[in-house]
Image (tube, rainbow, N blue to C red):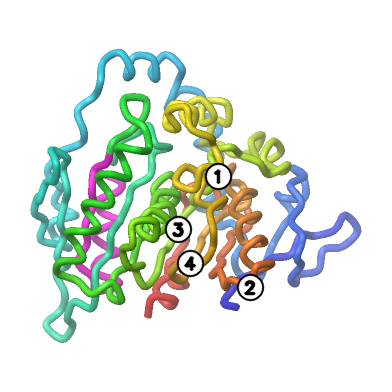
């Protein structure tokens, strides 16, 4: 089992160690520390800024959702910036009218490409790829992992449902398989993209397509129904995600289907014949409780899940140590 554990500090104790249980009491979360994986000063500062900005109250609103439903948006199709083009050659290879970016990392002469990465961006199934944020990280990932990268811009709610998204993503994966051995392929995604990455493994299995070698999930949204009893407590401290609006988006994205459908909530799907799964999450992330429940379920069923949890980590936060861990897993 390649897992990083943390300990919750009991009320009468301040020792550092490991523990199986995570409590989401507000005070206990702020006191938690683990062996070098506690929240950094940078992350504490960022969390404070996000809290003061009240981003979770205006990033996505009911009014915006209604507006997007009435006036469908065009998908992201921007030109990657200089920071991206310094790290990778980027081309468009669109599919079925949807933009698909292909990146080839610019590696030193002593290195060579060693596999392929299918990256699915986050945004709560309702926000498109943010070019200035997602693409530099994805280009860096291609360089660090020595992999070419495919980045599809997929259908979003409220204009679309998960059915259109998976239809496109299966076609993208099918095209990747024409030039890459599945044993050289990694699926990776953040937030909703993490849910899609694991969901795509379920979808591929259903249609008889081979699994990738690995799937890496960064702050993943693994169950759109939020079934964990700990969700409500974390919702009070997450500075980014708005639970009620995410429930609204989930209902739109489901298009009338049950929220525990494995392609909507991949944590609810069967664990047989999946690739190796690695999860990076943080305890101040609204999506953490259901990720923990998935990990525990996998453990009970004898499935090995790579786990890296950041004490006090906010949604989308990927520390240097966490990324080093991912790189180590992928070799």
- Judge left or right: residue 147 versus residue 43: left
Instruction: Measuring from the top left, give residue 233's x and y in whole percent.
Output: 71, 38
| Residue 277 numbered mark, or none | 4
Q: How many marks?
A: 4
Q: Which residue is mark 1?
A: 223
Q: Which residue is mark 3?
A: 217
Kind of element beneath mark 2: loop
Lower position in the chain sequence, tag 4 or tag 1: 1
Q: Mostly what secondary structure, the magenta segment?
A: helix
Image quadrant assignment for residue 126: top left
| Residue 302 numbered mark, or none | 2
Lower position in the chain sequence, tag 1 or tag 2: 1
Please report the bounds of the magenta region as a residue range.
131-154
Kind of element beneath mark 4: strand
In the picture, the quarter occupied by the N terminus is bottom right
- Measured in 3D between alpha carbons, the distance from the residue under mark 4 to the one under mark 1, in whole angstroms, is 16 Å
State which mark lies toward you, 2 or 3: 2
The residue at 43%/69% (across/down) is: 275
- Measured in 3D between alpha carbons, the distance from the residue under mark 4 to the one under mark 3, in whole angstroms, is 8 Å
Furthest residue to the right? Answer: 12
Instruction: Measuring from the top left, give residue 209's x and y in whole percent.
Output: 31, 63
- Measured in 3D between alpha carbons, the distance from the residue under mark 4 to the one under mark 2, in whole angstroms, is 13 Å
């Amino acid at each position: 089992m390649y897992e990083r554990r943390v300990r919750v500090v009991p009320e009468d104790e301040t020792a550092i160690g490991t523990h199986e249980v995570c409590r989401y009491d507000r005070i206990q979360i702020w006191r938690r520390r683990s062996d070098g994986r506690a929240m950094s000063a940078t992350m504490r500062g960022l969390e404070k800024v996000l809290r003061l900005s009240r981003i979770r109250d205006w990033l996505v609103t009911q009014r915006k959702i209604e507006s997007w439903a009435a006036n469908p948006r065009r998908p992201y199709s921007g030109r990657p910036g200089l920071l991206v083009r310094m790290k990778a050659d980027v081309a468009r290879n669109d599919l079925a009218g949807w933009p698909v970016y292909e990146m080839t990392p610019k590696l030193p002469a002593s290195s060579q490409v060693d596999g392929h990465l299918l990256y699915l961006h986050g945004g709560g199934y309702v926000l498109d790829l943010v070019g200035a944020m997602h693409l530099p990280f994805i280009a860096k990932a291609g360089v660090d992992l020595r992999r070419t990268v495919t980045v599809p811009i997929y259908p979003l709610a409220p204009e679309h449902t998960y059915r259109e998204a998976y239809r496109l993503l299966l076609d993208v994966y099918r095209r990747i398989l024409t030039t890459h051995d599945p044993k050289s392929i990694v699926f990776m995604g953040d937030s909703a993209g993490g849910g899609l990455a694991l969901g795509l493994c379920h979808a591929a299995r259903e249609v008889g397509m081979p699994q990738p070698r690995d799937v890496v999930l960064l702050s993943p949204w693994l169950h759109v129904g939020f079934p964990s009893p700990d969700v409500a407590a974390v919702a009070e401290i997450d500075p980014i995600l708005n639970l009620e609006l995410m429930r609204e988006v989930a209902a739109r994205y489901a298009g009338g289907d049950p929220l525990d459908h494995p392609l909507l909530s991949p944590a609810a799907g069967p664990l047989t014949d999946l690739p190796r799964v690695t999860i990076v999450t943080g305890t101040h992330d609204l999506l953490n409780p259901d990720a923990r429940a998935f990990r525990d379920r996998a453990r009970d069923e004898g499935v090995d899940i790579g786990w890296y949890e950041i004490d006090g980590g906010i949604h989308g936060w990927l520390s240097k140590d966490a990324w080093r861990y991912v790189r180590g897993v992928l070799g």
